[in-house]
Image (tube, rainbow, N blue to C red):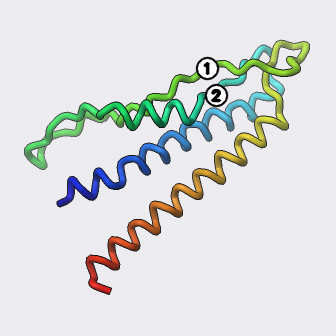
């Protein structure tokens, strides 16, 4: 029973992990907008999500509560790449601040939407379990 519930939420959790990772990358780009020779990085969310959903996590089996966890979270499958700027700066920095802020805002909005969707799904299951 619990494995079916886990399988139901796994795609949503993967999406949230990827959105969180992308937020970190975009925030680092914004923070380094004035750093000479800094190269902006990002990844294709759709490709990373398809890759993450297609691959299965290889987790160690914990047959006893006293076993230690492997400590490794699931791989996100995101291939981080350097961004090619439309208009590179003279100092070699490839961060285009306006575009990065726009990407960050869009990613934050999509993260919040995924979180709301997951939360509503959990509430629906709770209602079904309670019999309401």
Quadrant of the image for the N terminus? bottom left
Residue 35 occupies which quadrant of the picture? top right
Q: Residue furthest left?
A: 63
Mark 1, other Cα within 10 Å: few <14 / some 14–19 / many ≥20: few
**Residue 118 vs residue 72, the one in the foreground:** 118
Viewed as shown, does residue 54 lie left or right of 101? Answer: left
Q: Which mark is residue 81?
A: 1
Q: Position of residue 88 (x, y in %)?
A: 86, 17
Viewed as shown, does residue 85 lie left or right of 29? Answer: right
Q: Residue at x 57, y 35 (%)?
A: 45
Quadrant of the image for the C terminus? bottom left
Q: Secondary structure at mark 1?
A: strand
Number of numbered labels in the structure image: 2
Residue 70 vertical placement versus 79 (above, below): below
Residue receiving disc 2: 42
Q: Position of residue 93 (x, y in %)?
A: 81, 18
Residue 58 occupies which quadrant of the picture? top left
Q: Are marks 1 and 2 in contact (CB under 8 Å)?
A: yes
Mark 2, other Cα within 10 Å: few <14 / some 14–19 / many ≥20: many
Q: Position of residue 53 (x, y in %)?
A: 39, 37
**Residue 35 vs residue 25, the one in the foreground:** 25
Viewed as shown, does residue 31 lie left or right of 2? Answer: right
How many angstroms separate mark 1 from mark 2 (CA)? 6 Å
Viewed as shown, does residue 131 lie left or right of 96? Answer: left
Q: Residue at x 19, y 39 (%)?
A: 68
Q: Position of residue 19 (x, y in %)?
A: 55, 43
């Amino acid at each position: 029973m619990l494995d079916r519930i886990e399988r139901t939420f796994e795609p949503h959790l993967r999406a949230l992990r990827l959105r969180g990772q992308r937020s970190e990358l975009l925030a680092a780009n914004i923070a380094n907008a004035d750093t000479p020779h800094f190269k902006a990085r990002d990844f294709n969310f759709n490709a990373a999500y398809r890759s993450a959903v297609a691959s299965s996590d290889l987790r160690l089996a914990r047959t006893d509560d006293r076993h230690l966890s492997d400590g490794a979270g699931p791989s996100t499958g995101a291939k981080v790449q350097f961004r090619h700027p439309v208009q590179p700066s003279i100092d070699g920095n490839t961060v285009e601040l306006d575009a990065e802020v726009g990407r960050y805002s869009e990613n934050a909005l999509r993260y919040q939407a995924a979180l709301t969707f997951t939360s509503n799904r959990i509430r629906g299951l709770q209602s079904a379990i309670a019999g309401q």
